[in-house]
Protein backbone atom coordinates (compact mmCIF):
# COMPACT_ATOMS: atom_id res chain seq x y z
CA UNK A 1 0.00 0.00 0.00
CA UNK A 2 1.00 3.64 -0.27
CA UNK A 3 1.37 5.27 3.12
CA UNK A 4 1.96 8.93 4.01
CA UNK A 5 3.48 9.47 7.46
CA UNK A 6 3.12 12.92 9.04
CA UNK A 7 5.72 13.75 11.67
CA UNK A 8 9.18 12.17 11.38
CA UNK A 9 10.00 11.96 15.08
CA UNK A 10 10.41 8.72 17.05
CA UNK A 11 7.05 7.23 16.12
CA UNK A 12 7.03 8.50 12.52
CA UNK A 13 10.59 7.36 11.70
CA UNK A 14 10.14 3.89 13.16
CA UNK A 15 6.80 3.48 11.39
CA UNK A 16 8.22 4.76 8.09
CA UNK A 17 11.26 2.47 8.26
CA UNK A 18 9.28 -0.61 9.26
CA UNK A 19 6.35 -0.16 6.86
CA UNK A 20 8.83 0.40 4.00
CA UNK A 21 10.64 -2.79 4.96
CA UNK A 22 7.28 -4.60 4.79
CA UNK A 23 7.15 -3.64 1.11
CA UNK A 24 4.81 -0.65 1.38
CA UNK A 25 5.58 2.55 -0.51
CA UNK A 26 6.14 5.21 2.17
CA UNK A 27 6.33 8.97 1.93
CA UNK A 28 7.28 10.86 5.09
CA UNK A 29 6.19 14.45 5.75
CA UNK A 30 7.68 16.84 8.26
CA UNK A 31 7.71 20.62 8.65
CA UNK A 32 11.39 20.35 9.54
CA UNK A 33 13.42 20.31 6.27
CA UNK A 34 16.48 18.94 8.09
CA UNK A 35 14.64 15.74 8.95
CA UNK A 36 13.27 15.48 5.42
CA UNK A 37 16.74 15.90 3.94
CA UNK A 38 18.23 13.31 6.26
CA UNK A 39 15.61 10.72 5.29
CA UNK A 40 16.15 11.42 1.59
CA UNK A 41 19.89 10.97 2.16
CA UNK A 42 19.14 7.55 3.68
CA UNK A 43 19.89 8.60 7.26
CA UNK A 44 17.78 8.37 10.38
CA UNK A 45 16.92 11.67 12.14
CA UNK A 46 16.55 9.74 15.42
CA UNK A 47 18.84 7.45 17.39
CA UNK A 48 17.05 4.13 17.70
CA UNK A 49 18.46 0.60 17.32
CA UNK A 50 18.09 -0.68 13.75
CA UNK A 51 16.28 2.35 12.32
CA UNK A 52 19.29 3.90 10.55
CA UNK A 53 19.93 0.70 8.61
CA UNK A 54 16.26 0.19 7.74
CA UNK A 55 15.92 3.76 6.47
CA UNK A 56 19.09 3.41 4.40
CA UNK A 57 17.84 0.17 2.82
CA UNK A 58 14.32 1.53 2.18
CA UNK A 59 15.55 4.76 0.56
CA UNK A 60 18.05 2.84 -1.62
CA UNK A 61 15.29 0.44 -2.69
CA UNK A 62 13.06 3.40 -3.61
CA UNK A 63 10.35 2.50 -1.08
CA UNK A 64 10.86 5.51 1.20
CA UNK A 65 11.24 9.20 0.63
CA UNK A 66 10.30 12.39 2.45
CA UNK A 67 8.86 15.82 1.68
CA UNK A 68 7.70 18.98 3.40
CA UNK A 69 4.66 19.17 1.11
CA UNK A 70 1.43 17.69 2.47
CA UNK A 71 -0.48 17.81 -0.82
CA UNK A 72 2.26 15.90 -2.63
CA UNK A 73 2.11 13.12 -0.03
CA UNK A 74 -1.68 12.92 0.07
CA UNK A 75 -2.10 12.54 -3.69
CA UNK A 76 0.33 9.63 -3.64
CA UNK A 77 -1.09 7.76 -0.66
CA UNK A 78 -3.99 5.47 0.28
CA UNK A 79 -3.55 6.01 4.01
CA UNK A 80 -2.13 8.86 6.10
CA UNK A 81 -0.70 8.20 9.54
CA UNK A 82 -0.55 11.25 11.80
CA UNK A 83 2.47 10.88 14.12
CA UNK A 84 3.07 14.49 15.15
CA UNK A 85 3.92 15.41 18.73
CA UNK A 86 1.26 16.04 21.41
CA UNK A 87 3.27 17.66 24.21
CA UNK A 88 2.02 18.98 27.56
CA UNK A 89 0.98 22.58 28.11
CA UNK A 90 2.21 24.24 31.30
CA UNK A 91 -0.97 23.28 33.18
CA UNK A 92 -0.72 19.64 32.12
CA UNK A 93 -3.36 19.83 29.39
CA UNK A 94 -2.59 18.34 26.01
CA UNK A 95 -1.21 20.70 23.38
CA UNK A 96 -2.98 19.74 20.17
CA UNK A 97 -1.62 22.51 17.95
CA UNK A 98 0.46 20.14 15.81
CA UNK A 99 -2.49 17.75 15.39
CA UNK A 100 -4.79 20.66 14.44
CA UNK A 101 -2.23 22.03 12.02
CA UNK A 102 -1.60 18.75 10.26
CA UNK A 103 -5.36 17.95 10.14
CA UNK A 104 -5.94 21.34 8.54
CA UNK A 105 -3.25 20.70 5.92
CA UNK A 106 -4.59 17.24 5.15
CA UNK A 107 -8.14 18.67 4.92
CA UNK A 108 -6.87 21.18 2.38
CA UNK A 109 -5.05 18.49 0.38
CA UNK A 110 -8.17 16.28 0.35
CA UNK A 111 -10.01 18.89 -1.74
CA UNK A 112 -7.89 17.93 -4.75
CA UNK A 113 -7.86 14.22 -3.91
CA UNK A 114 -10.12 12.25 -6.23
CA UNK A 115 -10.05 8.90 -4.45
CA UNK A 116 -11.08 7.59 -1.04
CA UNK A 117 -8.37 8.24 1.54
CA UNK A 118 -8.08 7.16 5.20
CA UNK A 119 -6.47 9.23 7.95
CA UNK A 120 -5.26 7.33 11.03
CA UNK A 121 -4.22 9.21 14.17
CA UNK A 122 -1.24 7.49 15.75
CA UNK A 123 -0.35 10.40 18.03
CA UNK A 124 -1.55 10.00 21.61
CA UNK A 125 -4.73 12.06 22.05
CA UNK A 126 -7.40 12.05 24.77
CA UNK A 127 -10.68 10.19 24.13
CA UNK A 128 -13.03 12.23 21.99
CA UNK A 129 -10.29 14.19 20.23
CA UNK A 130 -10.67 12.44 16.88
CA UNK A 131 -14.47 12.63 16.87
CA UNK A 132 -14.84 16.14 18.30
CA UNK A 133 -11.80 17.92 16.89
CA UNK A 134 -9.99 16.09 14.08
CA UNK A 135 -13.02 14.99 12.05
CA UNK A 136 -14.84 18.37 12.21
CA UNK A 137 -11.62 20.09 11.13
CA UNK A 138 -11.08 17.70 8.22
CA UNK A 139 -14.71 18.08 7.10
CA UNK A 140 -14.82 21.85 7.46
CA UNK A 141 -11.62 22.50 5.53
CA UNK A 142 -12.11 19.86 2.83
CA UNK A 143 -15.87 20.34 2.43
CA UNK A 144 -16.03 16.52 2.30
CA UNK A 145 -17.91 14.04 4.49
CA UNK A 146 -16.33 11.41 6.72
CA UNK A 147 -17.54 7.92 5.92
CA UNK A 148 -18.50 8.87 2.38
CA UNK A 149 -15.52 10.75 0.98
CA UNK A 150 -12.77 9.80 3.40
CA UNK A 151 -12.22 7.49 6.35
CA UNK A 152 -10.78 8.06 9.83
CA UNK A 153 -9.25 5.77 12.45
CA UNK A 154 -7.44 6.00 15.73
CA UNK A 155 -4.40 3.75 15.64
CA UNK A 156 -2.42 4.30 18.85
CA UNK A 157 1.25 3.45 18.98
CA UNK A 158 2.63 1.30 21.83
CA UNK A 159 6.34 1.14 20.95
CA UNK A 160 9.03 1.75 23.56
CA UNK A 161 12.04 3.87 22.65
CA UNK A 162 15.17 1.70 22.69
CA UNK A 163 13.33 -1.41 21.44
CA UNK A 164 10.98 0.30 19.01
CA UNK A 165 11.73 -1.82 15.91
CA UNK A 166 11.33 -5.09 17.82
CA UNK A 167 8.11 -3.72 19.36
CA UNK A 168 6.81 -2.78 15.90
CA UNK A 169 7.16 -6.36 14.65
CA UNK A 170 5.94 -8.05 17.82
CA UNK A 171 3.29 -5.87 19.45
CA UNK A 172 0.78 -7.38 21.91
CA UNK A 173 -1.88 -6.28 19.43
CA UNK A 174 -2.56 -3.77 16.71
CA UNK A 175 -5.31 -1.46 17.90
CA UNK A 176 -7.68 0.20 15.45
CA UNK A 177 -10.50 2.49 16.58
CA UNK A 178 -12.61 2.91 13.47
CA UNK A 179 -15.12 5.49 12.31
CA UNK A 180 -16.64 2.76 10.15
CA UNK A 181 -15.82 -0.71 8.81
CA UNK A 182 -14.39 0.63 5.57
CA UNK A 183 -11.88 2.90 7.36
CA UNK A 184 -10.84 0.03 9.65
CA UNK A 185 -10.35 -2.38 6.73
CA UNK A 186 -7.95 0.05 5.05
CA UNK A 187 -5.80 0.53 8.15
CA UNK A 188 -5.86 -3.20 9.00
CA UNK A 189 -4.47 -3.89 5.50
CA UNK A 190 -1.20 -2.08 6.23
CA UNK A 191 -0.57 -4.46 9.18
CA UNK A 192 -1.28 -7.58 7.11
CA UNK A 193 2.19 -9.04 7.65
CA UNK A 194 2.56 -8.18 11.33
CA UNK A 195 2.21 -11.24 13.51
CA UNK A 196 -0.21 -9.90 16.13
CA UNK A 197 -3.97 -9.87 16.67
CA UNK A 198 -5.74 -6.87 15.19
CA UNK A 199 -8.25 -5.46 17.68
CA UNK A 200 -10.95 -3.27 16.15
CA UNK A 201 -13.16 -1.07 18.26
CA UNK A 202 -14.70 2.41 18.28
CA UNK A 203 -12.67 5.62 18.23
CA UNK A 204 -12.87 6.76 21.90
CA UNK A 205 -12.22 3.24 23.21
CA UNK A 206 -8.99 3.03 21.20
CA UNK A 207 -7.92 6.51 22.33
CA UNK A 208 -8.68 5.55 25.94
CA UNK A 209 -6.71 2.29 25.83
CA UNK A 210 -3.50 4.21 25.13
CA UNK A 211 -4.04 6.27 28.31
CA UNK A 212 -5.03 3.23 30.36
CA UNK A 213 -1.82 1.49 29.25
CA UNK A 214 0.52 4.34 30.07
CA UNK A 215 -1.24 5.14 33.36
CA UNK A 216 -0.98 1.49 34.36
CA UNK A 217 2.71 1.38 33.44
CA UNK A 218 3.33 4.45 35.58
CA UNK A 219 1.32 2.90 38.42
CA UNK A 220 3.22 -0.40 38.18
CA UNK A 221 6.60 1.32 38.29
CA UNK A 222 5.57 3.42 41.29
CA UNK A 223 4.01 0.41 43.04
CA UNK A 224 7.20 -1.61 42.59
CA UNK A 225 9.30 1.33 43.80
CA UNK A 226 7.20 1.82 46.94
CA UNK A 227 7.30 -1.93 47.68
CA UNK A 228 11.07 -1.74 47.09
CA UNK A 229 11.41 1.13 49.56
CA UNK A 230 9.44 -0.85 52.15
CA UNK A 231 11.50 -4.01 51.55
CA UNK A 232 14.76 -2.09 51.90
CA UNK A 233 13.67 -0.87 55.35
CA UNK A 234 12.95 -4.49 56.29
CA UNK A 235 16.33 -5.63 54.84
CA UNK A 236 14.50 -7.80 52.31
CA UNK A 237 15.70 -8.03 48.69
CA UNK A 238 12.87 -6.36 46.73
CA UNK A 239 13.97 -7.95 43.46
CA UNK A 240 13.60 -11.42 44.90
CA UNK A 241 10.20 -10.40 46.30
CA UNK A 242 8.93 -9.06 42.97
CA UNK A 243 10.41 -11.98 41.03
CA UNK A 244 8.40 -14.44 43.10
CA UNK A 245 5.36 -12.13 43.17
CA UNK A 246 5.33 -12.07 39.35
CA UNK A 247 5.39 -15.87 39.19
CA UNK A 248 1.72 -15.80 40.21
CA UNK A 249 0.01 -15.27 36.88
CA UNK A 250 -3.36 -16.35 38.28
CA UNK A 251 -4.00 -13.50 40.68
CA UNK A 252 -1.03 -11.10 40.59
CA UNK A 253 -0.13 -10.57 36.94
CA UNK A 254 -3.47 -11.37 35.37
CA UNK A 255 -6.84 -9.84 34.40
CA UNK A 256 -8.17 -10.70 37.89
CA UNK A 257 -9.02 -7.59 39.96
CA UNK A 258 -8.98 -5.38 36.88
CA UNK A 259 -12.71 -5.07 36.36
CA UNK A 260 -14.17 -1.71 37.36
CA UNK A 261 -16.76 -2.19 40.12
CA UNK A 262 -17.53 -1.52 43.76
CA UNK A 263 -15.12 -1.02 46.69
CA UNK A 264 -13.00 -3.94 47.92
CA UNK A 265 -13.62 -5.41 51.35
CA UNK A 266 -13.50 -8.71 53.16
CA UNK A 267 -11.36 -10.01 55.96
CA UNK A 268 -7.95 -9.67 54.29
CA UNK A 269 -7.38 -6.79 51.86
CA UNK A 270 -8.35 -3.88 54.16
CA UNK A 271 -6.67 -5.40 57.25
CA UNK A 272 -3.42 -6.33 55.52
CA UNK A 273 -3.11 -2.99 53.75
CA UNK A 274 -3.66 -1.21 57.09
CA UNK A 275 -0.96 -3.27 58.76
CA UNK A 276 1.56 -2.58 56.00
CA UNK A 277 0.81 1.16 56.03
CA UNK A 278 1.09 1.23 59.83
CA UNK A 279 4.49 -0.43 59.71
CA UNK A 280 5.59 2.05 57.02
CA UNK A 281 4.59 4.93 59.30
CA UNK A 282 6.57 3.41 62.16
CA UNK A 283 9.56 3.32 59.83
CA UNK A 284 8.98 6.95 58.76
CA UNK A 285 8.42 5.75 55.22
CA UNK A 286 6.25 7.86 52.95
CA UNK A 287 4.39 5.63 50.45
CA UNK A 288 1.93 8.04 48.79
CA UNK A 289 0.46 5.63 46.24
CA UNK A 290 -0.19 2.84 48.75
CA UNK A 291 -1.43 5.34 51.34
CA UNK A 292 -3.98 6.65 48.82
CA UNK A 293 -5.64 3.24 48.36
CA UNK A 294 -7.93 3.28 51.45
CA UNK A 295 -9.21 6.76 50.61
CA UNK A 296 -9.89 5.81 47.00
CA UNK A 297 -11.75 2.73 48.25
CA UNK A 298 -13.85 4.79 50.67
CA UNK A 299 -14.81 7.17 47.86
CA UNK A 300 -15.86 4.21 45.73
CA UNK A 301 -18.03 2.87 48.57
CA UNK A 302 -19.62 6.29 48.91
CA UNK A 303 -20.44 6.40 45.19
CA UNK A 304 -22.81 3.47 45.77
CA UNK A 305 -24.60 5.36 48.52
CA UNK A 306 -24.83 8.51 46.39
CA UNK A 307 -26.30 6.55 43.48
CA UNK A 308 -29.12 5.38 45.76
CA UNK A 309 -29.69 8.87 47.22
CA UNK A 310 -29.93 10.33 43.73
CA UNK A 311 -32.90 8.12 42.86
CA UNK A 312 -35.02 9.97 45.43
CA UNK A 313 -36.71 6.66 46.34
CA UNK A 314 -36.94 5.32 49.88
CA UNK A 315 -37.67 1.59 49.54
CA UNK A 316 -34.42 -0.14 48.71
CA UNK A 317 -33.62 -3.81 48.10
CA UNK A 318 -29.99 -4.84 48.48
CA UNK A 319 -29.13 -8.03 46.62
CA UNK A 320 -25.93 -9.41 48.12
CA UNK A 321 -24.46 -8.46 51.48
CA UNK A 322 -21.20 -10.39 51.83
CA UNK A 323 -18.13 -8.81 50.24
CA UNK A 324 -18.39 -11.07 47.21
CA UNK A 325 -20.56 -13.89 45.89
CA UNK A 326 -19.90 -17.42 47.09
CA UNK A 327 -19.09 -16.51 50.71
CA UNK A 328 -20.96 -15.54 53.85
CA UNK A 329 -18.04 -13.44 55.12
CA UNK A 330 -19.37 -10.03 56.09
CA UNK A 331 -16.25 -8.58 57.65
CA UNK A 332 -15.61 -5.13 56.15
CA UNK A 333 -18.06 -5.77 53.36
CA UNK A 334 -18.70 -2.47 51.56
CA UNK A 335 -22.32 -3.62 51.24
CA UNK A 336 -22.67 -3.63 55.01
CA UNK A 337 -21.39 -0.04 54.93
CA UNK A 338 -23.94 0.76 52.20
CA UNK A 339 -26.77 -0.80 54.22
CA UNK A 340 -25.72 0.91 57.47
CA UNK A 341 -25.46 4.32 55.79
CA UNK A 342 -28.87 4.04 54.17
CA UNK A 343 -30.40 2.75 57.38
CA UNK A 344 -28.91 5.71 59.25
CA UNK A 345 -30.57 8.03 56.76
CA UNK A 346 -33.97 6.48 57.41
CA UNK A 347 -34.28 4.37 54.27
CA UNK A 348 -36.57 1.36 54.22
CA UNK A 349 -34.33 -1.65 53.45
CA UNK A 350 -34.72 -5.32 52.63
CA UNK A 351 -31.65 -7.43 51.98
CA UNK A 352 -31.26 -10.71 50.15
CA UNK A 353 -28.14 -12.86 50.31
CA UNK A 354 -28.65 -16.62 50.22
CA UNK A 355 -25.19 -17.33 51.67
CA UNK A 356 -25.69 -15.02 54.62
CA UNK A 357 -29.24 -16.33 55.28
CA UNK A 358 -27.89 -19.87 55.21
CA UNK A 359 -25.08 -18.97 57.61
CA UNK A 360 -27.60 -17.45 59.99
CA UNK A 361 -29.60 -20.67 59.93
CA UNK A 362 -26.73 -23.12 60.14
CA UNK A 363 -24.75 -21.17 62.68
CA UNK A 364 -21.60 -20.83 60.57
CA UNK A 365 -21.43 -17.05 60.79
CA UNK A 366 -24.35 -16.76 63.22
CA UNK A 367 -22.44 -15.04 66.00
CA UNK A 368 -21.07 -12.31 63.75
CA UNK A 369 -24.46 -11.68 62.18
CA UNK A 370 -26.32 -11.54 65.50
CA UNK A 371 -23.72 -9.73 67.60
CA UNK A 372 -21.92 -7.38 65.22
CA UNK A 373 -24.67 -6.43 62.77
CA UNK A 374 -28.00 -7.24 64.48
CA UNK A 375 -29.48 -4.06 62.99
CA UNK A 376 -28.66 -5.35 59.51
CA UNK A 377 -29.43 -8.99 60.05
CA UNK A 378 -33.03 -8.22 61.01
CA UNK A 379 -33.49 -6.82 57.49
CA UNK A 380 -32.45 -10.05 55.80
CA UNK A 381 -35.08 -11.81 53.79
CA UNK A 382 -34.74 -15.33 52.46
CA UNK A 383 -37.19 -14.56 49.66
CA UNK A 384 -36.07 -12.73 46.56
CA UNK A 385 -39.68 -12.23 45.56
CA UNK A 386 -40.40 -10.47 48.83
CA UNK A 387 -37.44 -8.10 48.34
CA UNK A 388 -38.57 -7.44 44.80
CA UNK A 389 -42.14 -6.72 45.86
CA UNK A 390 -41.23 -4.13 48.50
CA UNK A 391 -38.46 -2.29 46.59
CA UNK A 392 -38.45 0.68 44.29
CA UNK A 393 -34.67 0.49 43.85
CA UNK A 394 -32.63 -2.71 43.60
CA UNK A 395 -28.91 -2.51 44.39
CA UNK A 396 -27.03 -5.47 42.96
CA UNK A 397 -24.17 -5.99 45.40
CA UNK A 398 -22.68 -9.24 44.23
CA UNK A 399 -22.96 -11.80 41.49
CA UNK A 400 -25.53 -14.14 43.03
CA UNK A 401 -26.83 -16.49 40.30
CA UNK A 402 -30.42 -16.17 41.55
CA UNK A 403 -30.19 -12.39 41.22
CA UNK A 404 -29.16 -12.59 37.57
CA UNK A 405 -32.27 -14.67 36.86
CA UNK A 406 -34.47 -12.38 38.93
CA UNK A 407 -33.42 -9.28 37.05
CA UNK A 408 -34.89 -10.71 33.89
CA UNK A 409 -38.30 -10.50 35.57
CA UNK A 410 -38.21 -6.97 36.94
CA UNK A 411 -40.58 -4.49 35.43
CA UNK A 412 -40.14 -0.80 34.73
CA UNK A 413 -41.04 0.29 38.25
CA UNK A 414 -37.59 -0.81 39.52
CA UNK A 415 -34.49 1.28 39.26
CA UNK A 416 -31.48 -1.03 39.23
CA UNK A 417 -28.09 0.09 40.53
CA UNK A 418 -25.60 -2.55 39.51
CA UNK A 419 -22.32 -2.51 41.46
CA UNK A 420 -20.92 -5.66 39.87
CA UNK A 421 -22.04 -5.53 36.22
CA UNK A 422 -24.18 -8.59 36.59
CA UNK A 423 -25.62 -8.01 33.12
CA UNK A 424 -22.81 -7.83 30.58
CA UNK A 425 -23.47 -5.76 27.52
CA UNK A 426 -25.50 -3.01 29.16
CA UNK A 427 -23.73 0.31 29.29
CA UNK A 428 -25.15 1.39 32.65
CA UNK A 429 -26.14 4.84 31.43
CA UNK A 430 -29.88 4.13 31.37
CA UNK A 431 -31.81 5.93 34.11
CA UNK A 432 -33.43 2.65 35.18
CA UNK A 433 -30.24 0.63 34.96
CA UNK A 434 -27.18 2.36 36.32
CA UNK A 435 -23.68 0.99 36.54
CA UNK A 436 -21.35 2.32 39.21
CA UNK A 437 -18.29 2.96 37.03
CA UNK A 438 -19.43 2.02 33.57
N1 LIG B 1 8.10 8.52 21.57
C1 LIG B 1 7.47 7.45 21.95
O1 LIG B 1 8.05 6.50 22.50
C2 LIG B 1 5.99 7.30 21.72
C3 LIG B 1 5.38 6.06 21.84
C4 LIG B 1 4.02 5.95 21.59
C5 LIG B 1 3.27 7.07 21.26
N2 LIG B 1 3.89 8.28 21.17
C6 LIG B 1 3.07 9.44 20.76
O2 LIG B 1 3.29 9.64 19.37
C7 LIG B 1 3.28 11.04 19.07
C8 LIG B 1 4.61 11.44 18.44
O3 LIG B 1 5.64 11.24 19.38
P1 LIG B 1 7.17 11.42 18.97
O4 LIG B 1 7.95 11.08 20.20
O5 LIG B 1 7.44 10.68 17.70
O6 LIG B 1 7.21 13.00 18.69
P2 LIG B 1 8.45 13.89 18.14
O7 LIG B 1 8.37 15.18 18.83
O8 LIG B 1 9.71 13.10 18.22
O9 LIG B 1 8.11 14.07 16.60
C9 LIG B 1 7.05 14.82 16.12
C10 LIG B 1 7.39 15.30 14.73
O10 LIG B 1 6.24 15.91 14.16
C11 LIG B 1 6.71 16.96 13.33
N3 LIG B 1 5.60 17.87 12.99
C12 LIG B 1 5.02 18.83 13.75
N4 LIG B 1 4.03 19.43 13.08
C13 LIG B 1 3.96 18.85 11.86
C14 LIG B 1 3.14 19.04 10.72
N5 LIG B 1 2.17 19.96 10.68
N6 LIG B 1 3.35 18.26 9.62
C15 LIG B 1 4.31 17.32 9.65
N7 LIG B 1 5.14 17.10 10.71
C16 LIG B 1 4.96 17.85 11.80
C17 LIG B 1 7.84 17.58 14.14
O11 LIG B 1 8.69 18.37 13.34
C18 LIG B 1 8.52 16.33 14.66
O12 LIG B 1 9.52 15.87 13.79
C19 LIG B 1 2.99 11.75 20.38
O13 LIG B 1 1.58 11.94 20.48
C20 LIG B 1 3.44 10.76 21.42
O14 LIG B 1 2.76 10.93 22.65
C21 LIG B 1 5.24 8.41 21.37
Image (cartoon, rainbow, N blue to C red):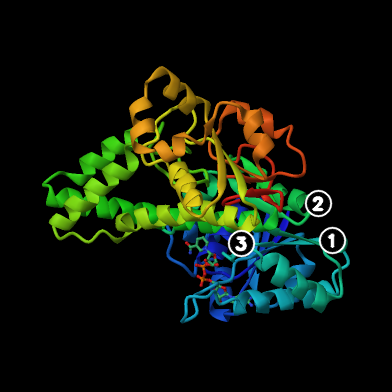
Disc on res. 258? none
Residue 203 horizontal/vertical position (percent):
69, 57
Disc 2 to disc 3, C-alpha distance? 18 Å
Say which element carries label 2: helix
Disc 1 to disc 2, C-alpha distance? 10 Å
Residue in the image at 48% along x and 38% along y: 255
Decide which of 82, 203 is in the foreground and name it. 203
Residue 188 horizontal/vertical position (percent):
70, 48
Can I make out residue 155 in this image?
no
Q: Is residue 106 above or below residue 153?
A: below
Residue 293 horizontal/vertical position (percent):
36, 54
Disc on res. 182? 2
Residue in the image at 48% along x and 55% along y: 302
**Ligand 1 closer than 8 Å to the CB at disc 3?**
yes
Label 1 sits on residue: 116
Say which element carries label 3: loop
Tags 1 and 2 touching, CB below 8 Å: yes
Image quarter where ligand 1 lies? bottom right
Tags 1 and 3 touching, CB below 8 Å: no
Residue 62 horizontal/vertical position (percent):
65, 60
Disc on res. 122? 3
**Ligand 1 closer than 8 Å to the CB at disc 2?**
no
- Quadrant of res 42: bottom right
Instruction: Using residue 359 as the reference point, say whether residue 396 is left or right of it.
Output: right
Q: Residues within 10 Å of mark 1 (few under 14, many from 20)?
A: some
Amino acid sequence: MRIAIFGLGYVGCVSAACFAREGHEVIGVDVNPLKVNMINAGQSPIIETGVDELIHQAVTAGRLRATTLTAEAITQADVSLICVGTPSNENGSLDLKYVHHVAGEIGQALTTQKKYHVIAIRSTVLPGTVTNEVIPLLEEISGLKVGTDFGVCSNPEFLREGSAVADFYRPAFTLIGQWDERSGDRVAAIYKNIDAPVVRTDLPTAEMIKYVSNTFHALKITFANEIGNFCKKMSIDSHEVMRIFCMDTKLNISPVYLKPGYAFGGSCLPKDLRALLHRARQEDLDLPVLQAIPRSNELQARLGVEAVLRTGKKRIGILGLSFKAGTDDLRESPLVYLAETLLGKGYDLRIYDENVSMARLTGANKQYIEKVIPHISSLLSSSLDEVLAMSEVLVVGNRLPAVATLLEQTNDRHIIIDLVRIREGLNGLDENYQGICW
